[in-house]
Image (spheres, grey):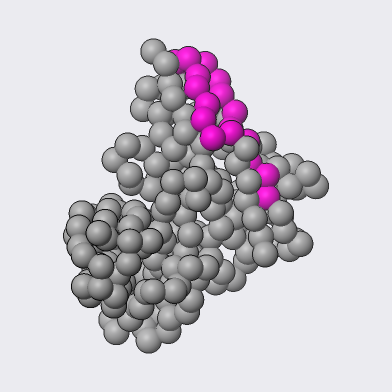
Amino acid sequence: AQTVTQSQPEMSVQEAETVTLSCTYDTSESDYYLFWYKQPPSRQMILVIRQEAYKQQNATENRFSVNFQKAAKSFSLKISDSQLGDAAMYFCAYRNSGNTPLVFGKGTRLSVIA
Amino acid sequence: EAQVTQNPRYLITVTGKKLTVTCSQNMNHEYMSWYRQDPGLGLRQIYYSMNVEVTDKGDVPEGYKVSRKEKRNFPLILESPSPNQTSLYFCASRPRGGWTEAFFGQGTRLTVV
């Protein structure tokens, strides 16, 4: 079974600085998808960014980018120019191709210091 | 507005009293799913449905039931709730062929005493 590991339960960053959240996963599949979700205090789950395993180019969405290392099974999230509104729980998630369920990591709580 | 709507947002109930958490989406999505979120465990899938009358177990289905009689609705049923089902529950949906559940409900905080 696939597993997703987020080794940093909590992180903090100064406003306007850059922070990187780590995620590793375990799979024997070659075709899969990876995601980062944000959960602010409102509890709403928000899809931040996604990456297809067959794409070598790292995904980018505005201030959010990923470092996808397929051989190392690593999928880190970089947040640039951190803002107070970035404070949230961040979940890394994995899914095989086809109609398979998402597998979530346990989350990293990010605090942004003004 | 495209959305997934869950009700209720908060619920406190007693052990053994049947309850239903409703979930409705207005995007004509084929795929719907239920997750529970517990501290230190992330989100775990309870049940999912790929279309009307098609449901299947996720990772933690024990103690739960679902039904999918209409495309838009996917209720979660707890026939005999127990305290270990105290959790935050999310319903989510995506279209056929969609990469992931991009639309989540607002969450239902359930407490079973």
Q: x%, y% of residue B22?
A: 24, 68
Residue extent of the magenta highlight:
A8-25
- Quarter the C terminus of chain B occupies: bottom left
- Quarter the N terminus of chain B occupies: bottom left
Q: Locate residue A7: give its quadrant.
A: top right
In this view, B73 is above or below A87: below
B35 left or right, relative to A1: left
What's the residue at 80%, 47% (across, down)?
A71
In this view, B38 is above or below A68: below
Would you say residue A11 sits in the magenta stretch? yes
The tally of labels here is: 0
Q: x%, y% of residue B54?
A: 42, 84
Q: Which of these two is toward me, B79 or B28?
A: B79
Would you say residue A80 sits in the magenta stretch? no
What's the residue at 38%, 48% (across, down)?
A45
Q: x%, y% of residue A67?
A: 67, 36
